Amino acid sequence: MARYIGAIDQGTTSTRFILFDENGMIVQSHQLEHKQYFPNPGWVEHDPEEIWNNTVSTMKETLLKSGIDAGEVAAIGITNQRETIIPFNPKTGEVYHRAIVWQDLRGSQIIDNLKEKVDEEWLRAKTGLLFSPYFSGSKIKWLLDNVDGLKEKAESGDCIFGTIDCYLTYKLTGQVVTDVTNASRYMLMNISSLSWDEELCDMLSIPSRALPKIVPSIGEVYGECTLFGASIPVCGILGDQQAALFGQACFDSGEAKCTYGTGCFLLENTGEKLCLSKYGLISTVAYQIKGEKPVYALEGSIAVAGSLVQWVRDNLKMVKNAKELDELALEVSDCGGVYIVPAFAGLFAPYWRSDARGVIAGLTGYADRRHICRAVLEATAFQVYDIFEAMAKDSGIALSSFKVDGGLTNSAPLMAFQADLLGIPVIRPKVIETTALGAAYAAGLSIGIWQNRKNLSRYWKEQLRWTPDMEEGVRSEKIALWSKAVSRTLNWEKEKD
């Protein structure tokens, strides 16, 4: 009987279920978007029940479209938007508040207060992270301080603060766990011991019993899913960016990938060595196989990438879809002096400025919507350039090529411009759904479909390559103007007050 591996890919804007065969190729998939809630400026929420219902629907539709019986699915892996927090009852499943999304800024004041009391280098040494409302800790603290009765429930064991992987695993199997990659994003896990740290929990007055059990990413079956008339092992959890690193077969130290999705994330494998950044990056767990030491990564995170294209489509009504934006961008040879810095939720790496807000700079009467469309694409490439430079300084490794994945890699003008900025070839693999593929690999390794990582490396195949073709003088001038535009975004919130 053929064996298939399912991957739940729960992202910021949608949920997908993808079936892969034993060669790592996509057999069938289904995707559903979910609603974004913006209760206040800088706040972003999701409905956990909608996400769960969409997860079940995508699984069901994928099986129906493929004609594959649930009994032929050997395992299900999970990959998810990280840092997003759901408070729920581990006994009844009751959700106490909508999910607070990773982009959400409501914890900014909590973080500012911590900065006055706690040394950031102490935090970095403990967690690999910096003080930012991006991570889950301040979101949990906000929930405890603002949802009636939640403190008592957390202290009594009637509330778990789980990331999306935790919530979905609970709904699928009844088990309350999170893997080390997601746990490393709470700002509460000791990145060396891979356990919840009491000092960190005390820092935010969060009871450790309200946090899920931390488990390895690979090599352990967390429970069984029986929704579709068969018992399917749920095994293999990786946060979305770690999953993409794994799906890109970046198994060795010094290998890196960049995922272009709602946000944009560049990760470099640093092996078993925990490398603490000096240039505005964070250190994170790349993955852990049961019984083995963890593998670490350096990471640079960008809040707004693909979501900028959505903003131009939905808020400005400038284009009907991403394809039209690409077509308009290709009608002009450059951005016409227009630079967009999409600091809608502040700036993430390497700046970490929650006071920043977005700007469109360099506008003249010459510019039209084609130049703005091109500037939209170039904004993502410039943000990646900033992280790329910081990562080279931290790791001391000069990459000779750049693996990319995610929906925005379908934009040829963006990828060509990215190659020009970085000065090295940009390479897209044959299977660009590497986030889901990484989760499928993790699940398949957990139950022995694949024996080791070397077995998986042979499945990686190049599909497209963009090579740099920009004069150095032009490149330097564009980077200087980008830096100037970034400087205009800073201190916006302070000036407004």
Image: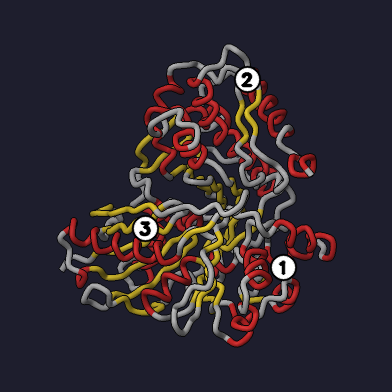
**Quarter of the rendering containing residue 193:** bottom right
Marks 2 and 3: which is nearer the front? 2
Kindly identify the amino acid type of the residue bearing the numbered disc 1.
Lys
Can you say whether 231 is above or below 181 in the image? Answer: below
Secondary structure type for disc 3: helix
Amino acid carrying label 2: it is: Leu
Mark 3 closeness class: few <14, some 14–19, many ≥20 residues within 10 Å: many
Q: Which mark is residue 48?
A: none
**Residue 157 vertical placement versus 103 (above, below):** below
Point out residue 300 in the picture as x, y percentages from the top left corner: 61, 48
Label 3 or label 1, whichever comes before in sequence order? 1
Observer-side mark, 3 or 1, equals: 1
Colouring used for the render: secondary structure
Residue behind mark 3: 456
Asked whether 465 or 87 is in front, the reply is 87
Camera-side mark, 1 or 2: 2
- The location of residue 391, given as percent across then percent down, is 64, 45
At 65% from the left and 79% from the top, the residue drawn is 151
Which residue is rendered at x = 58% and y = 46% of the image? 303
Give the CA separation, mark 1 to mark 2: 44 Å
Which of the marked residues, 2 or 3, is nearer the chain's N terminus?
2
**In the foreground, 317 or 358:** 317
Secondary structure category for the residue under label 2: loop
Q: Amino acid at mark 3?
A: Leu
The residue identified by callout 2 is 363
